[in-house]
Image: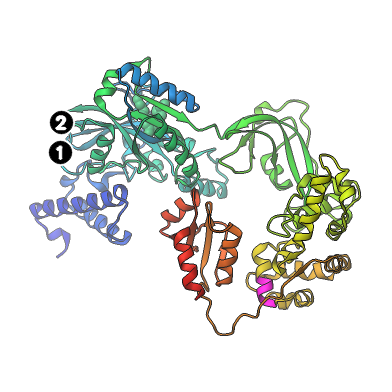
């Protein structure tokens, strides 16, 4: 039966059924996060509805799911006066501010007991108001100045997760829902990527992108932008009632198809608020959207009413802000650092600035391509970004603030440390050609050799290595093992005792494993995993030393570039001399056991990640145990991860694994499993 043969009555019934199905699927998809049909089947329902509506235009209503996009562009936005003002929030910048807030709340309420708070992420987006009349979305407005906002009805209608028609029928006849429209991080990145390839303007952050997308006079443009919304409070409520606690109102919203932030929690007392704050600080990076703090709200509406408002903010809520992740400062100079493999990195010397919770005075600029991309000059005012424990970055310069005497940044032609020539390699990197003649490369090579994952020389820190090289006590890694107590004891901040300790630590480190030794040599692109693969494949040093580029590529994870670096390393006479010297001064390891042929490793093909604190073993021991059983161990969780071993205080990796549905193993479970696997 084709659609045109339907009678009006049949069409009406059909349209109603389809709309109900589509709304129900939207609800499952956006609110419950539990879709029950494939995208293609959903598209078919929409197509069917569209085709019936095309034949029976009298059945089209504004709340039909087909009617999200299509209105003609506006000339300008209309103004909307908020019947109830949209307030702002007072800020707390630390735990003292939070405790003061809690104290004021309790004093005003005249209670000694703890107060119940709803804790929610403070979304970094645009505050909006949605008005539903008889369950139908009739108006969307920006917050504006809190009293008057702009009419963005046509634009909010294009946002898939905002219901045009509320689910159920127990909503108040007039209901104003407030919340934040934002652009998820992933959508923002994609939007900017696309803008870049088309040479269009990129947005500086998701918040600006969300604001720019909402302020489009042509709603067809908004419809193409990845916007989303979480609802966080009610405004007008007429012809119906809402629950008496804030968190219950949000739950009720959810039943009506309105999206609620899944991180909302109800807690008791200020210290529980502070706990929530630290948990969310950890989780912040892994959330799919940006937040700039936490909002604590007194949960009981009766108590909220009792507390009332002051100026433009409620006394019953406060925004606890994360330290700003972006700040402006001045680029005072650029210096060039020489790394272990000679790579020359421009480093920004900054006017110290407090950002992301710490004072930053240096930031890496990676390479000269990055300097050019940022269009930087010395003297520029720059924006520094520091998120979580991530290395601070210069994200952009502010051209308007460039002083007249701003200077160009130039790559030196000769190494700033050893004066050897600098060559540009095929990638963006510039390199000092001095090799181990360059004291900077020597220092870095020795630091790497001594580091925890290499020879693990206890007590041999960076400062000491620098002194050894500067004083001429050590020029190759083998010289370390020839050190005696007296010359060490005479160095800055060293005494007889620490010198003796270092000499014994050096002795202890002589017994190592071949994989640590290979890693410690600092061959370009050979990290721990590659070193381990080389050892598993060849099992002895001589075999690795004499392998050709072609043979090396048979090793897991070794491609032509890495293979070439390895071959080149072992072809250089001075490297072979240092290795011989190391063996002569007593560095040794046990032979690698031949793996038993044909016995499948229990964790063959699996990819594990370790995180958090372990109690029965160190993380390195856990890692070694997993590798012995055939697993590959990597540093970050991705779709390829088989399992995550999560110790105590596991943070963002755990969250990510959970969100990807990856198996999470506790330390206790792991210990049991190890016993099983080793049998
Ligand atoms: S409640 C009277 N909850 O923060 C309380 N606001 O400075 C009004 N915001 O303009 C707001 N996330 O844009 C509330 N979970 C949240 C929020 C939130 C972000 C924004 C909102 C408002 C500003 C207040």
43 displayed left or right of 401: left
Q: State which region is magenta.
A: 533-538
Which residue: 48% across, 47% down? 286
Which residue: 61% across, 80% down? 595
Give the residue number, with chain letter if any, for mark 1. Answer: 170
Instruction: Indicate the quadrant containing the N terminus: top left, top right, bottom left or bottom right.
Output: bottom left
Q: What element carries label 2?
A: loop
- Which residue is nearer to you in this view: 349 or 666? 666
Which residue: 49% across, 39% down? 281
Q: In this view, does 319 lie above or below 491?
A: above
Mark 1 nearby-residue class (10 Å; few <14, some 14–19, many ≥20): some
Quadrant position of residue 661 = bottom left
Mark 2 nearby-residue class (10 Å; few <14, some 14–19, many ≥20): few
- Which residue is nearer to you in this view: 312 or 424? 312
Query: Is residue 82 something that shows in the picture?
Result: yes
Residue 90 on the magenta span: no
Give the residue number, with chain letter if any, for mark 2. Answer: 240
445 displayed left or right of 197: right
Mark 1 and mark 2 in contact (Cβ < 8 Å)?
A: yes
**Residue 278 position in % (x across, y down):** 47, 38
User: How far, Cα to Cα, is label 2 from label 1?
Assistant: 8 Å
Q: Is residue 610 above or below residue 551?
A: above
Q: In the image, ligand 1 is in what quadrant?
A: top left
- Which residue is nearer to you in this view: 211 or 363? 363
150 displayed left or right of 292: left
**Residue 526 position in % (x across, y down):** 70, 63
């Amino acid at each position: 039966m084709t659609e045109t043969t339907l009678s009006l009555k049949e069409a009406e019934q059909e349209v109603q059924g389809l709309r109900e199905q589509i709304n129900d699927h939207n609800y499952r998809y956006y609110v419950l996060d539990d879709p029950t049909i494939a995208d293609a089947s959903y598209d078919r329902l929409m197509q069917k509805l569209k085709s019936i509506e095309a034949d029976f235009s009298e059945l089209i209503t504004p709340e039909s799911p087909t009617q999200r996009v299509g209105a003609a562009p506006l000339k300008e936005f209309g103004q909307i006066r908020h019947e109830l003002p949209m307030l702002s929030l007072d800020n707390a910048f630390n735990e003292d501010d939070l405790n003061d807030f809690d104290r004021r709340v309790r004093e005003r309420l005249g209670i000694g007991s703890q107060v119940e708070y709803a804790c929610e992420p403070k979304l970094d987006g645009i505050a909006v108001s949605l008005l539903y009349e008889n369950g139908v979305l009739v108006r969307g407005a920006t917050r504006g100045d809190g009293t008057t906002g702009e009419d963005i009805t046509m634009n909010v209608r294009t946002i898939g997760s905002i219901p045009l028609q509320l689910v159920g029928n127990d909503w108040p006849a007039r209901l104003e829902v407030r919340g934040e429209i934002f652009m998820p991080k992933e959508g923002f990145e994609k939007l900017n990527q696309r803008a870049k390839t088309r040479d269009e303007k990129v947005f500086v952050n998701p918040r600006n992108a969300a604001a720019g997308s909402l302020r489009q006079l042509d709603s067809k443009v908004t419809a193409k932008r990845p916007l989303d919304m979480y609802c966080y409070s009610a405004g007008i409520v007429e012809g119906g009632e809402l629950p008496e606690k804030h968190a219950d109102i949000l739950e009720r919203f959810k039943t009506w198809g309105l999206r609620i932030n899944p991180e909302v929690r109800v807690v008791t007392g200020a210290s529980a608020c502070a706990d929530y704050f630290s948990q969310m600080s950890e989780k912040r990076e892994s959330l799919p959207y940006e937040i700039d703090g936490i909002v604590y709200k007194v949960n009981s509406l009766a108590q909220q009413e009792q507390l009332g408002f002051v100026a433009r903010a409620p006394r019953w809520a406060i925004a606890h802000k994360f330290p700003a992740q972006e700040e402006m400062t001045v680029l005072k100079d650029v210096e060039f650092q020489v790394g272990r493999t000679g790579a020359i990195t421009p480093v920004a010397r900054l006017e110290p600035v407090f950002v992301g919770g710490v004072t930053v005075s240096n930031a890496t600029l990676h390479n000269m391509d990055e300097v050019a991309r940022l269009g930087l000059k010395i003297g520029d005012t720059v924006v520094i970004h520091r998120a979580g424990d991530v290395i601070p970055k210069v994200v952009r310069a502010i051209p308007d603030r460039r002083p007249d005497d701003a200077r160009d940044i130039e790559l030196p032609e000769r190494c700033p440390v050893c004066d050897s020539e600098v060559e540009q390699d095929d990638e963006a990197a510039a390199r000092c050609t001095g090799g181990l003649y360059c004291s900077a490369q020597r220092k870095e090579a020795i630091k790497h050799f001594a580091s925890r994952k290499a020879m693990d020389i206890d007590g041999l820190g960076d400062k000491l290595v620098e002194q050894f090289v500067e004083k001429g006590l050590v020029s190759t890694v083998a010289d370390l093992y020839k050190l005696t107590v007296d010359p060490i004891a005479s160095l800055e901040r060293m005494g007889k005792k620490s010198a003796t300790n270092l000499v014994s630590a050096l002795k202890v480190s002589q017994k190592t494993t071949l994989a640590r030794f290979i890693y410690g040599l600092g061959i370009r692109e050979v990290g721990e995993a590659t070193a381990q693969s080389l050892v598993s494949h060849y099992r002895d040093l001589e075999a690795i030393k004499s392998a050709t580029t072609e043979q090396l590529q048979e090793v897991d994870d070794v491609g032509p570039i890495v293979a070439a670096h390895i071959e080149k390393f072992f072809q250089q006479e001075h490297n072979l001399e240092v290795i011989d010297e190391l063996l002569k001064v007593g560095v040794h390891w046990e032979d690698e056991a031949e793996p038993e042929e044909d016995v499948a490793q229990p964790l063959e093909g699996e990819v594990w990640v370790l995180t958090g604190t372990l109690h029965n073993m160190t993380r390195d021991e856990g890692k070694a145990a997993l590798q012995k059983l055939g697993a590959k161990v990597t540093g970050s969780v991705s779709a390829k991860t088989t399992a995550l071993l999560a110790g105590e205080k596991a943070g963002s990796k755990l969250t990510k694994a959970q969100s990807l549905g990856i198996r999470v193993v506790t330390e206790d479970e792991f210990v049991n499993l190890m016993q099983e696997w080793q049998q």
